Amino acid sequence: MTNVVAISNDLTYVRVGLSVSKRVGSAVKRNLVKRRIRNTFANLNVAGGWDFVVTAKPHSSAASYAEFEHAIHRSIEQIGIDVATPEAAPDSQVVM
């Protein structure tokens, strides 16, 4: 559904870059996919500063928000990045 690439940075917050091509669908569908990805990262508390680049695959427009959340969370854990619980990192910031 998505590809996630990450690199650490010297900042205290997370930055997210999005790549959603026209192969995903019309402008309405692409914007929906981008909103879902942004919302997923806004609700995700990643420990430390990271730069993420998320590339949406063509069939991602048919995915629900829960599927996005699960796929991105799983991808981040596979990379080896610790995901903190909301109680552990209440002041986390995401810059998009």
Image (cartoon, rainbow, N blue to C red):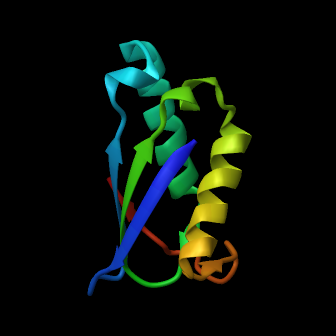
Picture quarter containing residue 27?
top left
Decide which of 15, 76 is in the foreground and name it: 76
Image coordinates of residue 51 in percent, x first then y, are 33, 69
- Point 48% across, 29% down: residue: 58
- Quadrant in which the N terminus appears: top right
Image coordinates of residue 36 in percent, x first then y, are 54, 38
- Placement of 83 over or under 20, stated as above or below: below
- Point 56% across, 28% down: residue: 59
- Placement of 1 over or under 77, stated as above or below: above
Picture quarter containing residue 78?
bottom right
- Point 67% across, 72% down: residue: 86
Decide which of 21, 96 is in the foreground and name it: 21
All told, the count of numbered labels is 0
Decide which of 92, 65 is in the foreground and name it: 65
Image coordinates of residue 46 in percent, x first then y, are 53, 75
- Point 65% across, 52% down: residue: 71
Compared across the picture, whether 66 is left or right of 9 comes to right
Residue found at the very far left of the displayed protein? 10
Image coordinates of residue 93 in percent, x first then y, are 42, 67
Decide which of 31, 4 is in the foreground and name it: 4
